[in-house]
Amino acid sequence: MSEQPRIMAEAVGAEEAEGAERVDGADRHVHWASVAVFAVVSCGLAWLVAWPLWARGEGMADPLLPLVATAMMLTPAVATLAALVVDRRTRGRRPARDILRGLGMWPLRPARRTIGMSVVMVFAMPLIVAIGLGITWIAGLAVLDPVGFSGFAEALAGELPPGTPMPPVVLVVALQLAMIPVGAVVNAPFAFGEEVGWRGWLLPALRPLGVWPALIVSGAFWGFWHTPLILLGYNFGLTDVTGVLLMVLSCTLFGVLLGWTRLRTGSVWPAVFGHGAFNASAGLGALLVAAGSPVPPAWLSGPLGLISCAVFAGVVAVLVAAGQFRRSRLSARLG
């Protein structure tokens, strides 16, 4: 082998070895000090941001709820900055490009895989929500009207001023469905506030534990982080530890799916757009449920209820069966 090809081969081999080292953790262990700071800051800020809802005593009826829930989504990003400060103090300063690469923000390499996975997630999320609604229908828990959209038509008529003609309901529903990908993009900055913490920083930080422990722990912590809102009845209408445990379960399963995109591409962006698309799809039931249909409890059939948990578990099982969690399928560029 000539000198130049030999040098190039050695460089490629060194890069692959470095990538493999990053997969297993650069130092082969979790930096628990940084993880502890991330956990305390993210949860502490979540409670601080949500405190006005508790102090005002109006719960889910509080007009501040949308603002508080949105502001909470930014707290994991702040926690990530705090964890990076601890990393810098304990492990030394890193160039900005290495930090961005470690968080999965840049570069988009390979770009085709990252962009393609992001697009897939935007369209997969409403499909997953729709499958959950279909199971609810088949189980007899609710009646759907995917042709006449009678429930949505009834709600729309109730919101229009007296004497206002009804717009074509099918057209309005079509526009609502078409807006889900747009909603994924609009939601992306706020979804990024969460995902840069959960999948951008925490998942790679826990990677030395192994792929599955890192996925499960990061997802479970994501669910636990929602506690200030869940205990007020957010998502499930449950105001005790049962709601928190259900949120932990659903976020663990959903987190495995989002985490897989991070491990598969090395990028945080598919998780960001998948998270944004899921939030944009959460109201899909309001379009499809028939007028007069029974309303099952949110803890059972809501977007993050037990039925959705079963759907997430099914999707993950399919990915496992397809070999998508094999080491050879996962990106080495996580740090």
Image: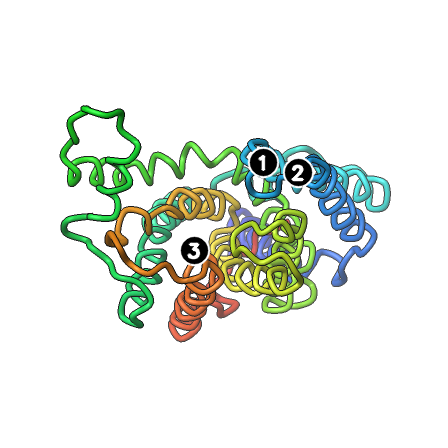
Residue 199: x %, y % from top left: 58, 50
Residue nearest the viewer, comparing 202 with 63 = 63
Q: Residue furthest bottom?
A: 321
Label 3 and label 2: CA atoms lie apart by: 23 Å
Asked which secondary structure carries label 1, the reply is: loop
Residue density around tag 2, few if under 14, some if 14–19, many if 20 or more, within 10 Å: many
Closer to us: 86 or 173: 173
Closer to the chain start, of discs 3 and 2, is 2
Q: Measure how far apart labels 1 and 2 are at the Cα level.
A: 7 Å
Do we see residue 74 in this rendering? yes
Outermost residue to the front = 162
Q: Position of residue 52 (x, y in %)?
A: 70, 35
Location of mark 1 (residue): 62
Residue under numbered circle 2: 53
Instruction: Identify the residue at horizontal 26%, vertical 55% (top origin).
Output: 292
Nearer the N terminus, badge 3 or badge 1?
A: 1
Q: Which residue is mark 3?
A: 303
* Residue located at (65% from left, 63% from top): 217
The reply to whether callout 1 and callout 2 are in contact (CB within 8 Å) is: yes
Quick check: marks 3 and 1 in contact, CB under 8 Å?
Answer: no
Residue shown at the point (31%, 55%) measured from the top left: 127
Give the residue type that dot 3 points to. Answer: Pro
Q: Picture coordinates of residue 39 (x, y %)?
A: 75, 50
Please give the name of the residue rendered at 69% of the width and 63% of the height, measured from the top-left corner. 208
